[in-house]
Amino acid sequence: MKVTRIETIQHADFANLLWVQVHTDDGLVGLGETYRGVASAAAYVHEMVAPYLLGKDPRAIERHHSTLSGSTTHRSMGAEVRGLSAIDIALWDLFGQSVGLPVHQCMGGPVRDRIRIYNTCAGYHYGRRAGVPGQSFAASWGMGAQQGPYEDLVKWQEQERAGELARELLDMGITAMKIWPFDQFADETGGQHITPSQIEKGLKPFRQIRDAVGMRMEIAVELHSRWNLQAVLRIVEALDEVRPMWYEDPIRMDAPAALAELAAKTRVPITASETLAGRHAFRELLERRAVGIVMLDPGWVGGLTEAKAIASLAAAYHRPVAPHDCTGPVVYAAGCHLCLAAPNAMIQEGVRAYYHGWYPEAVTALPIVENGYVRPPEGPGLGTRLRDDFLASPRVTRQVSELS
């Protein structure tokens, strides 16, 4: 088997997403995905990956990952890592198809049949377009751009119905949810300070949830790396009464010592970080005891090869992993496969507005959500493909590199 064609695919309605398809001479097609900075990631795929990978056996995944990741000294979440992530996911998909097994079987076999999920309380258009520098952070939230039963961001943010939303989720069997009510205040000071009155406003949806359902719902606190250490210390002190599930990305991930200081001052686990790429960045956080739960995104971290290595590294420090997905359906499927294969997987992120909304428009099959748990799609590889009608849309553009 050898790679004969690599194509990158963009859709104008989903400007933050890049899909990669790796074609082989025996007709198999591997599917990968990454998110944000898609033009630069696509350029990397065609300028750097294609000249290397075309003509080679795609099943030598570790060799390809090592060669491509070693071809640059870049170790943050730049275009190279995003492009490599999409390619690596596609190679795992191809490997599974070539042997007729799902990806989690190829990664060593399942340690569980399903994984618990939490609902990130976003809406149908959340994150479809990146915010422009200088815009408010909420400008990319897509608030109310589409109405439907799962417009969860509007429910807890604008309509102040967080308690009702928690009841809805519990009725679906979902027992954990994530919200970010402090972000709106970070725009005012660049995250340098938060006032007592702002903290009280931010606490309101948490209190609504506790009043409505008590401790039956776990609440993850998303902070989007928008605060400095002193401001976030004030926030987490006030949140003690809520007994959160975790504090996610409380500060920027460029100050491990500050993150470790925060971790030492709260009993609530620090979750970090979807913004990191490569096992070496996670190793530093683990060595400093700065992180309680390791969150990674297969579409950003370096692909499934790197994600699996980071999960094993986290296990050595007695830390669980919680794959991120608030981006696209292929990474969602990849994360679910990882969760079945990684013994220390804790929980998988999902956005019900996505998997009941636009995800089915793009792919043929999705992870199966039942009563608060999820398992990967059935079938070999990732178990999903881009839909023919999605690919045929006039809103789609493709760039192709082929074996000459």
Image (cartoon, grey):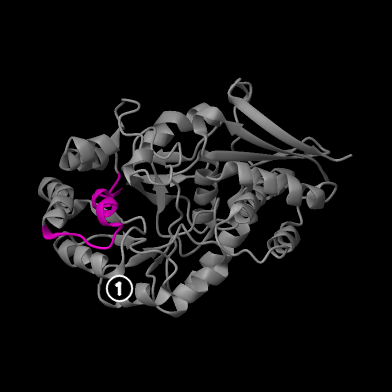
Q: Is residue 190 left or right of residue 199?
A: right
Residue 173 placement (x, y as % from top left): 29, 43
Residue 234 placement (x, y as % from top left): 19, 66
Magenta extent: 174-196
Query: In which quadrant of the rendered view does residue 304 lie?
Result: bottom right
Relative to 372, is 282 above or below?
below
Relative to 92, is 71 above or below?
below
Residue placed most toward the observer, 187 or 374? 187
Q: Secondary structure at mark 1?
A: helix
Residue 228 placement (x, y as % from top left): 31, 66
Residue 352 placement (x, y as % from top left): 37, 37
Relative to 358, is 252 above or below?
below
Q: Is residue 328 left or right of residue 346?
A: right
In the picture, the quarter occupied by the C terminus is top right
Residue at image position (34%, 67%) is 270
Query: In which quadrant of the rendered view does residue 393 lie?
Result: top right
Q: Is residue 179 left or right of residue 215?
A: right
Residue placed most toward the observer, 67 or 27? 67
In magenta segment, residue 55: no
Residue at image position (24%, 65%) is 231
In magenta segment, residue 188: yes
Instruction: Please tell me how many numbered marks the rendered image carries.
Output: 1
Answer whether residue 355 is visible to the viewer in this image.
yes
Residue identified by numbered label 1: 262
Specify the amino acid type for callout 1: Leu
Q: Residues within 10 Å of mark 1 (few under 14, many from 20)?
A: many
